[in-house]
Amino acid sequence: MLTGTFGLFVVARTTVGALHGLFVAVGFVLAMSIVPPERMGRAISVVVSGLFVSTALGVPLGTLVGQVLGWRGSFTAVAVLGVVALIATLVVIPSMSSTGGGAGSQARYAFAPRVLAALLMNALAFAAVYSALTYIVPFLESITGISGALISVFLLAYGVAAAVGSFAGGRFADQDAARTLIVGAIGVAVSLLVLYLAGTIAALVALALLALGSFAMGMVPSLQYRVVSLAGPGGQLASSLPVSAANVGIALGAYGGGVAIGSSTASSAVIIGLIIAMVSIPVAWATSFLKPPATADAAEPVVAADVAPEPA
C-alpha cells in the first residue's frame, strides 16, 4: 500500500500469501476443536464456505473500490478489514492449547505414508481443477464464443456452486469422507469431459462449470477430514498440510495448463485437467482403504483441549 516499487510489492504479496495459509490452517484447527467429532466435516465446510463467500464478494467490491479510489484505495480497505478481523479474533476466539505434544512428537504421525497418500489426493484434486479453471476465460472467449459481462456471470455461477458444494460437502464428509472423495473425483472428471466435448454450447458449458464447482469444492471438507483423521495424534500438525498440498496442486495445474495452452488451443488446458482428474480416481479409491493409526491415543484427531465440547 505504501510502496510503488515492484520488488517490495512482490515481497509483501509473498508474505501475505504465507500468512493466509497459516490463517486458514489455524481456522481449520479451531473449527474442528469446538465441535464433537461427528460434526468435524461440517465445521470444516463452514470455514471453506466462508473463504468462497469472501472471495465472491471481495473481488467485485475490491474492483469497484479500485476503480473509484485507485489501487491504493483497494489495499487500504483490505488493511482496514484486516485490523477489524484482528480485533474480532482477539475478542471472540478462545485461547487454544495443544494436547498432542510438540511438533516433533506429532510429526511421525502427521507425515506418515498414509497421510502423504491423502495429501497426494489433495494435490491431484486441485491440480485437475485449476489446470482448466486458470484458463477458463480464454476458453470461454475462443471456444464457447462469449465475452464481456456474460463471462462474469459464468464465473459467478461457478463461485456460487463452489460455495454451495463446499458447505454441503461437510455433511458428506461426516458420513463417509473416503467415499465422498471417490464420487467427487469421478464428478470432476465427468464435468471436465463435458466441458471439453460441449465447449461450443454455452448452456452445457454453464452446467459443466456448475457441476465442476460443486464436485470439486464439495471434496474439500473430506480432503481435510481424511488427512486429520489419518494422522491420529498428529492431527493438529497435519491440519495445516492440506492447504500446502492444495497450493502445490494449484501451482502445478496452472503450470501444466499454461504449457498446454501455449502450444495448442484453449481447450488443451481442459484436457490436462481431465487427465489429472482421471489419475485422481484410482488414487481416491486406493486411499479409501487407509485407516488411522491403531494406537490408544489415536481414537480421534487431536485438536485443542481448552475449547473442546463437554462430554455427553
Image (spheres, rainbow, N blue to C red):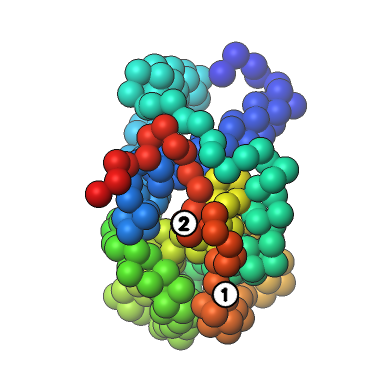
| Residue 249, above or below 208 | above
How many angstroms separate mark 2 from mark 1 (CA)? 15 Å
Residue toward you, 167 or 300:
300
Total number of numbered discs in the rendering: 2
Towards the viewer: 200 or 197: 197
Q: Residue at x 55, y 72 (%)?
A: 291
Residue 76 % position (x, y): 46, 18
* Direction left: furthest residue: 312
Q: Which residue is mark 2?
A: 300
Determine crowd level at label 1: few under 14, some 14-19, many 20+ residues with C-alpha closer than 10 A: some
The earlier-in-sequence mark between 2 and 1 is 1
Quadrant housing residue 287: bottom right
Contact (Cβ within 8 Å) of mark 2 with mark 1: no
Q: Hey, which residue is sitting farthest front in the picture?
A: 296
Residue 185 can be seen, yes or no: yes
Residue positioned 57% across, 67% down in the render: 294
The residue to which callout 1 is attached is: 290
Q: Amino acid at mark 1?
A: Leu
- Expressed as whole percent of the image width and height from the top left, the position of residue 77 reads 41, 21
Left or right, 93 with reference to 182 = left
Identity of the residue drawn at 65% across and 48% down: 106
Residue 309 in which image quadrant: top left
In front here: 155 or 227? 227
Q: Nearer the viewer, mark 2 or mark 1?
A: 2
